[in-house]
């Protein structure tokens, strides 16, 4: 039988989801507002790094610039090279009134799924004008969770227009404008596809990546297009009832070969960020008890929370996430819920910086 990550994931999820009952309140914590990082630190790698040994339940403290000390020769560091596109648009209704759009994904030619403000004042049929007519839009359909399908009309190249009038969409908890929007991009970002940055990767500098390579750690890249779930809260009491939206991913043959070679030689797979974890676990292949991945491309709605058994990822590098979020649930699944929630308490007591521009943790 051919082994595909998506088939394996479907069977595996069916088995463990039915056995899990976990309340969303179990992933809550109180965070002082002053610990929500509003700006990135300079340089990137001077952010703090909490180091967690999950087997021995030990929590230590370092700095991201020392990351190489916690990697081993033969490891494989996997990065998400997606780039944030200028998905935030400001316009006005043809009948008057300001409008804000957050583009999520292109569904068909010139048709985009988007979040809109003010939602109640934007019914189907509403026409919107951007930049005095450089771009026109019409709301075609109303979807769940306040989303809309938007049809755009324009002359020229749409991507060029977006770069001209669009803004990089910072998360809603960041209230200060960036003087340099490139600071919400990783240094290894490539094709503009995402509505949010893979924030665990924001800490890397060219020098640090060179040090990692010189230690004998291979570096591989995947692409997961970060979309709506970055902005959507979990609204159900029992977390297994939460519906994850699917996100596009691509893992090519070269990357699969690098990762499989590292696994075969006994190296650890080090995932930089939750998006990398979701991709690698989606394309995992465990036929005949052989740990490996396959090159694949498609969409994943894999929802990872405590009870999940990881098949590929050995080490996780991640930021500190919002309470009650699917990202925090994934981290708890990897590091153990009690230990991770204890680590969050310690991070708060030691004034770590939280969320997108905040500090990082390494779990092994």
Image (cartoon, rainbow, N blue to C red):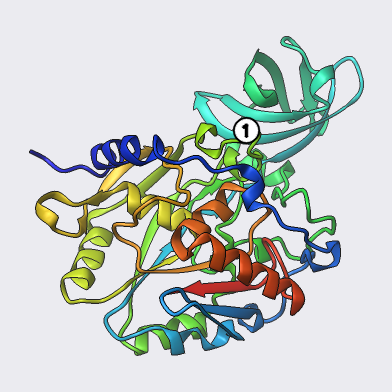
Q: Is residue 268 left or right of residue 107?
A: left
- The residue positioned 35% from the left and 68% from the top of the image is 314
Residue wearing tag 1: 236
Location of residue 267 (image quadrant): bottom left
Compared to 250, does 301 lie above or below?
above
Compared to 197, does 11 lie above or below?
above
Residue 178: x, y in percent?
A: 78, 62
Residue 328: x, y in percent?
A: 58, 55
Q: Secondary structure at mark 1?
A: loop
Picture mark count: 1
Residue 268: x, y in percent?
A: 30, 74
Toward the viewer: 249 or 335?
Answer: 335
Q: Is residue 20 left or right of residue 170?
A: left
- The residue positioned 33% from the left and 81% from the top of the image is 217
- The residue positioned 53% from the left and 30% from the top of the image is 106
Quarter of the picture holding the N terminus: top left
Q: Is residue 184 visible?
A: yes
Q: Is residue 162 left or right of residue 299?
A: right
Toward the viewer: 174 or 310?
Answer: 310
- The residue positioned 54% from the left and 75% from the top of the image is 204
Compared to 245, does 280 lie above or below?
below
Toward the viewer: 205 or 279?
Answer: 279
């Amino acid at each position: 039988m051919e082994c595909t990550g998506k088939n394996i994931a479907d069977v595996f999820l069916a088995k463990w989801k039915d056995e899990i009952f976990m309340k969303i309140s179990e992933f809550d914590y109180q965070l002082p507002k002053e610990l929500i990082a509003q700006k990135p630190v300079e340089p990137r790698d001077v952010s703090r790094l909490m180091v967690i040994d999950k087997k021995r339940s030990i929590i230590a403290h370092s700095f991201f610039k020392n990351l190489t000390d916690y990697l081993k020769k033969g490891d494989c560091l996997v990065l998400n090279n997606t780039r944030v596109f200028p998905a935030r648009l400001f316009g006005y209704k043809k009948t008057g009134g300001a409008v804000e759009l957050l583009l999520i994904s292109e569904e068909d030619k010139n048709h985009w799924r988007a979040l809109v403000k003010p939602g109640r004042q934007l019914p189907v049929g509403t026409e919107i004008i951007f930049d005095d007519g450089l771009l026109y839009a019409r709301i075609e359909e109303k979807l769940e969770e306040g989303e809309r399908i938007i049809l755009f009309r324009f002359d020229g190249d749409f991507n060029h227009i977006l770069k001209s009038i669009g803004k990089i969409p910072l998360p809603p908890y960041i209230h200060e404008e960036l003087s340099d929007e490139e600071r919400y991009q990783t240094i290894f970002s490539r094709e503009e596809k995402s509505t949010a940055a893979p924030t665990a990767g924001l800490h890397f500098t060219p020098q640090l990546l060179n040090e990692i390579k010189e230690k004998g750690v291979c570096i591989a890249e995947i692409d997961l297009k970060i979309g709506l779930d970055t902005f959507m809260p979990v609204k159900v009491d029992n977390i297994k009832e939460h519906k994850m939206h699917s996100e596009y991913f691509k893992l090519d043959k070269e990357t699969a070969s690098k990762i499989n070679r590292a696994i075969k030689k006994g190296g650890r797979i080090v995932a930089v960020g939750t998006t990398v974890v979701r991709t690698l676990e989606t394309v995992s292949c465990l036929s005949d008890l052989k740990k490996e991945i396959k090159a694949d491309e498609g969409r994943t709605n894999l929802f990872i929370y405590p009870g999940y058994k990881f098949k590929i990822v050995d080490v996780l590098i991640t930021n500190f996430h919002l309470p009650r979020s699917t990202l925090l649930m994934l981290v708890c699944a990897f590091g153990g819920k009690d230990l991770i929630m204890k680590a969050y308490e310690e991070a708060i007591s030691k004034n770590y910086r939280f969320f997108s521009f905040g500090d990082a943790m390494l779990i092994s």
